[in-house]
Image (cartoon, helix red, strand yellow):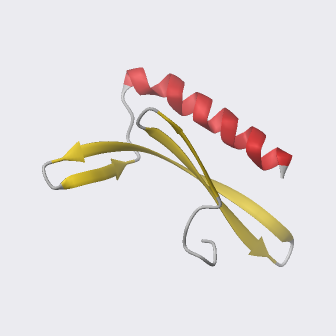
Amino acid sequence: MSESNRPIHEIRLGRVKAAIWKNETENGTRFSVLLSRIYKTDSGWDSTNSFGRDELPLVAKCADMAHTWIFQQ
């Protein structure tokens, strides 16, 4: 992933999050996006890449917003 091991940008809608990573390659800068859902457990916060039916519109919106952000770079 990125040199700092942190995403370059994050988009969050409710509990759905898009983390955008910047990757420098021989062919120039590439971006990748990790979509996840955060949830609370007894020991704190955790995340998963599994989404329920009602979260899918937020996943689509986060993906669209990530796409727009990347094209603006």
How many numbered discs? 0
- Quarter of the view holding residue 39: top left
Question: From the viewer's perspective, is residue 47 above or below residue 16?
Answer: below
Question: From the viewer's perspective, is residue 62 above or below residue 23?
Answer: above
What residue is shown at x 35% (from left), y 50% (from top)? 47
What residue is shown at x 59% (from left), y 76% (from top)? 4
Side of 34 where 54 appears, left or right: left
Side of 71 where 2 appears, left or right: left
- Quarter of the view holding residue 27: bottom right
Q: Position of residue 52 (x, y in %)?
A: 36, 28
Instruction: Tell me the quarter of the image containing the N terminus.
Output: bottom right
What residue is shown at x 84% (from left), y 46% (from top)? 72
What residue is shown at x 18% (from left), y 47% (from top)? 41
Question: From the viewer's perspective, is residue 37 above or below residue 55?
Answer: below
Question: From the viewer's perspective, is residue 66 above or below residue 57?
Answer: below
Side of 39 where 16 appears, left or right: right
Q: Position of residue 9 (x, y in %)?
A: 64, 54
Q: Position of residue 70 (x, y in %)?
A: 77, 49
The residue furthest left is 42
